[in-house]
Amino acid sequence: MARAKVSSTIELEYETFGDTQHPALILMEGHGAQMVKWDTEYCKMFAAKNLFVIRFDNRDCGLSTKFDGVEVDLPAVLTAALLEEPVPPVPYTLSDMANDVVGLLDFLKIDRAHIFGVSLGGMVAQVLTIEHPTRVRSLISVMSMTGEPEFGESQPEAINALLSETPPDRAGYIKHSVVYQAYHSKKYRSDEVSKTSAARDFDRMYYPQGSTRQLAAVYASGRRTEKLRAIKTPTLVVHGIDDTLISPSGGERTAELIPGAKLVLVEDMGHDMPKPLWGYLVELISDFALKN
């Protein structure tokens, strides 16, 4: 793992897999998730497909730069966004997070990359493609949405799980992790996997306050409807049929708006990428990327 200075104020922790001469594939995680959620074995599977794989911690997460002490009124931001009123000030937006990725590409001396983002990462990937189209070879938007609140609605149990307060102690944090199975694959959800992942994440970096600011960035960034219609980049949209955190209509709407986008709805996939689906997803995504 290494650290990249991507702007005057932001440094990103990152790690690469594979041959630098192969096409680059940037992996972008979701709300509050550290880059290690992209399992090392999963990353190596993509690298074996002749892709140069890069995973990294988003700002305000993991080992990347954090906005310690910067307050945000999340309820006010949510209310304003849903009413389509002026949003209170936020520390950063999805555009700022997209600029971080451009800075990482510059740091690594990569002109263009395939951008694979999940959930919040998919939203950042969309904004990156809209605002920096010359840097994107293909857009792969997974379990994500368009910024239109009427699409990709969450089930109450799922959003309550996402926003539930995490215990500050290691044992409590690990025990609490099974709550998030509310929006995982129905077939493949696992207490063992949830708890093992939680232990890994807690030991690497426990930083729940960054998640609040990241969520504020999502809502403050608004709708991308017309801008998505203008995308000319080859696009693959993937969504789990079992996803209750961002319902499949979020992916369907994304593919509807982006001209020529390919939509794939995946059985037995929720708002997660369980290991039994890795082989299928690696084939699907790497085949798409390498054709573009």
Image (cartoon, helix red, strand yellow):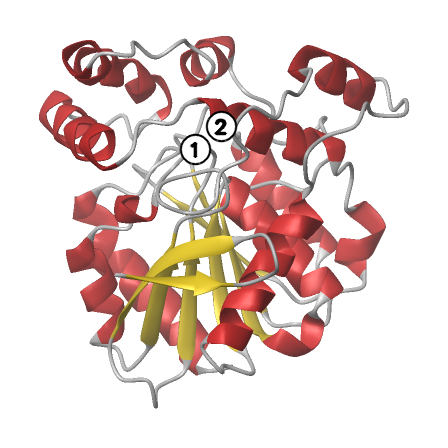
- Looking at the picture, how far across and down is residue 10, in whole percent? 54, 53
Side (left or right) of 25 relative to 202: right
- Looking at the picture, how far across and down is residue 123, in whole percent? 60, 46
Q: Which of marks 1 and 2 is nearer the N terminus?
A: 1
Height in image: 225 above or below 214? below
Residue occupying the point 14% across, 31% down:
193
Q: Which residue lies furthest to the right in this view?
A: 85
Height in image: 91 above or below 162? below
Q: How much space separates mark 1 and mark 2, taking CA atoms?
A: 5 Å
Q: Residues within 10 Å of mark 2 (few under 14, many from 20)?
A: some
Q: What residue type is labelled 1?
A: Gly
| Viewer can see residue 188 | no
Q: Which residue lies furthest to the bottom in this view?
A: 21
Residue occupying the point 60% across, 23% down:
153
Which quadrant would residue 136 be assigned to in this image? bottom right
Side (left or right) of 141 relative to 224: left
SS type, badge 2? helix
Which quadrant would residue 129 be assigned to in this image? bottom right
Residue occupying the point 66% across, 45% down:
94
**What residue would you read off at disc 2?**
211
Residue 32 is labelled as 1
Q: What residue type is labelled 2?
A: Ser
- Looking at the picture, how far across and down is residue 228, in whole percent? 75, 55
- Looking at the picture, how far across and down is residue 93, in whole percent? 69, 41
SS type, badge 1? loop
Which quadrant would residue 176 be assigned to in this image? top left
| Viewer can see residue 178 | yes
Residue occupying the point 53% across, 40% down:
120
The answer to whether the residue labelled 1 contacts the one labelled 2, judged by CB atoms less than 8 Å apart, is yes
